[in-house]
Amino acid sequence: MSITHLVTHSGGFHADELLSSAVLTRLFPQAELLRSRDRQWVTPAADKIIYDVGGAYDADAQIFDHHQRPGPLREDGQPFSSFGLIWAHYGRAYLAAMDVPVDDVEAIHTKFDTKFVLPIDLLDNGAMEPSVAGPLSILTLPALLGILKPVFDDTSPTADDDAFFTALPIARSFLEAQIRNLAAKARAHSIVANAIAKTGTSAILELPMGMPYRTALEQAEANHILFVAHPRGDDWALNGIKLSNDTFEQRADLPAAWAGLTDTALEDASGVKGAKFCHNARFIAVASTREAILKMAEIAVQDVQ
């Protein structure tokens, strides 16, 4: 029997059922998304998927709630929210529907679960305090989606449903963008790995276009590479390599004498015709030609050494 209804609870909403809804509505686009707590709707049936409501977790019966006691736990003992349960059972099919190559599905499923789903699960269950985000706590995805709830004195009988269906495409856009980015990083990884192999002992890595490269560098243990050059539109760019996503510190900075300079001033400081720009923080420089950017890269390497 085909799925005709996707059922979650009525009233206020959170990120977990919004994101679950984004997954399920892509997989079952003909199904009606219904928000209800009526027993007839939250009782399992072959043509329904019920989530974040119903007081049970039974994948065979297609009911995925986590509010009951004891609630469902991951293998490491951390709690699931409805999003984690839906992702565990439908995430791979969702990735296939997003045209993720079959060879990348398992790795992306795991990475997305760790980086995106688990924090939603922990926050929804009170196992993580929003304060861990510090001053940025109001800018986390659950907080931003929560802002879309109706205000307290909105007396419209459809206020909660209206807000939910306004928030749903926004949640979907973040979900799909994150998956597209993970898929792109997987594509980039093989390109960067091949470029690293061709680079040999050089401290300069040349890529055919701008793309994520740090993870591939780390996995290849290519610690000798200090700068990355690639075309950028009509120009060429030279980038430093951050030590991690949590810092602006780099393996090596561009020369201090170039910081903040442009055009003729940068040409004079670098001695390279075609040098166009160097960021004041010395993490990127731009030149008009490949020859110019590679010359700047060579000078930057000599400056470090």
Image (cartoon, rainbow, N blue to C red):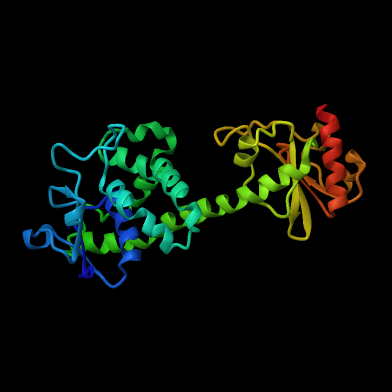
The mark total stands at 0
* Frontmost residue, 185 versus 164: 185
Rendered view: 302 above or below 180: above
Q: Quadrant of the C terminus?
A: top right
Tell me which residue sits at (30%, 35%) in the image.
75
**Whole-percent x, y for residue 295 in the image:** 88, 43
Tell me which residue sits at (63%, 49%) in the image.
190
Q: Answer with left or right where residue 231 lies relative to residue 62.
A: right
Tell me which residue sits at (46%, 54%) in the image.
179
* Frontmost residue, 179 versus 190: 190
**Whole-percent x, y for residue 65 in the image:** 19, 48
Q: Quadrant of residue 110?
A: top left
Q: Answer with left or right where residue 286 lies relative to residue 268.
A: left
Q: Is residue 11 visible?
A: no
Q: Quadrant of residue 28?
A: bottom left
Residue at the outermost front position: 103
Q: Is residue 131 visible?
A: yes
Q: Quadrant of the N terminus?
A: bottom left
Q: Answer with left or right where residue 277 lies relative to residue 81.
A: right
